[in-house]
Amino acid sequence: MKLLDLLRMILDNLNRRKSRVALTAVGVVIGTASVVLLISFANGMQQNTANQIGNMGDLTTIFVYPGAPMEVGARSGGGGMGAPLEKPLNNEAIEQISTLPGVSQIIPRVDLMGGSMIKFGKLEAWASVVGLPIQDASVLGYTAKEGTTQLERGTAILGGWAVKNFYDPSMRPGQEPPPPPDLAGQQVRVVIFKYSEDGQEIRKTYSFRIVGVLAETQAEADSWLLVRMDDLIPMNEWATGQRANYKRNGYHQLIVKADGVDTVVELTKQITEMGYMAWTPQGIVQGMNSLFTIIQVIFGGIGAIALLVAAIGIANTMTMAILERTREIGLMKAIGASNRDVLSIFLGEAAGIGLVGGLGGVLFGWGGGKMLNLVLLQTLTTQAAENGGLPPTVVVYTPAWLPFFAVLFAAAIGLLSGLYPALRAATLEPVTALKYE
């Protein structure tokens, strides 16, 4: 039997039983739509989580901290015990880490070793004073909400949350708090303090010009007052009363930039094996991806249960079709149709029901996802604005491969469901089939 003749016969047979085919296909539509919608929902959760973590910092960044404390005797290889020491992040550590494949840049970080307060006119605020040897904060993936990310001597960049933290210490109870000041281009005073041996507080004031305010990322940089390391070192020397030698004694942190996202996790593992503590946001992303893969499998399984019920319906429909068309099958065989021809006709009809149901399910699942996106995005964005969090970027995301997979899967379910009834039809004896009433 030619392919065109086979297709024409399959379509004619399906067209003769429109109501039964439609009701059977509805089950496939529901199952396919469930698979598409649930997997799309899990994908949307994964995309949104990845975007949220990505907004917290550059995913090619690794944060390295001094190694865990170890005994002096253990470090030297001797048997004696001594005070525990950290593995410092000094120039030797920088050279050691820089030899690893995939490292593109290493930026040392120094924090202020004392208390501090930022003052602007009558307003005061707290912020973490951080020093980096960079000229542009954009190398760390930060963007400026106001001003610039260019950093020079005597200038500073303020985090997005820190600028909202200003308050009036002389404000009376019940008085409305002042709005966040516009600090871009303004001069602020950074008051740092320490305590003498007799417990007296000693203060010293430094002046910085705020050249930019960073966009909020819901990360550590939101509370920074970022200055050049050359400006912070004298402040630390005054606060500690000691001359700073970070190249030998070690920096507080190293910010390691990798060549690409794919190498970050392996690079973090290698740095940890060197004896340092390392962390990267990409590690969270990979862990979340594994979790969401499991969620996708579970959600897909729930939808597949609905498809299983639909498969039983297809098998029942095809079995009833055989009983109704037994004499027709006998007549086909009597005029020369082979078992393969009969098998192809019934398998084609079963696959056709699955295909039609799969197409309808994909349309309903895709359309339902779009509607959920419109409703949930608006609701979640409003909640995020009220709570001060980052708004979601997507709720339901349908990957390009999913509709094609769902249609093929539905057609395959139909094909498998019709296999047993088709085999029964193909193996009917022509004489017995012609006598069937």
Image (cartoon, rainbow, N blue to C red):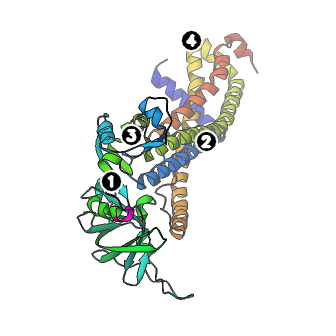
Looking at the rendered structure, which numbered label has been put on residue 299? 2
Q: Report the residue marked by disc 4.
A: 336
Q: Report the residue marked by disc 3.
A: 264
Do residues under tags 2 and 1 come within 8 Å of each other at their CB atoms? Answer: no
Viewer-nearest residue: 278 or 33: 278
The first of marks 4 and 2 along the sequence is 2
Kindly report which numbered mark, 4 or 3, lies closer to the viewer in this rendering.
3
Classify mark 1: residues with Cα within 10 Å, few (<14), some (14-19) or many (20+). Answer: some
The first of marks 2 and 1 along the sequence is 1
Q: Which portion, as a residue range, is magenta? A: 238-245
Magenta-colored stretch includes residue 241: yes
- Identify the residue at image location x=59%, y=41%: 295
- Identify the residue at image location x=58%, y=24%: 347
Q: Secondary structure at mark 1?
A: helix
Distance Cα–Cα, label 1 vs label 3 = 15 Å
Q: Amino acid at mark 2?
A: Phe
Distance Cα–Cα, label 3 vs label 2 = 30 Å
Kindly report which numbered mark, 4 or 1, lies closer to the viewer in this rendering.
1
The first of marks 4 and 1 along the sequence is 1
- Reply above or below: 89 against 192: above
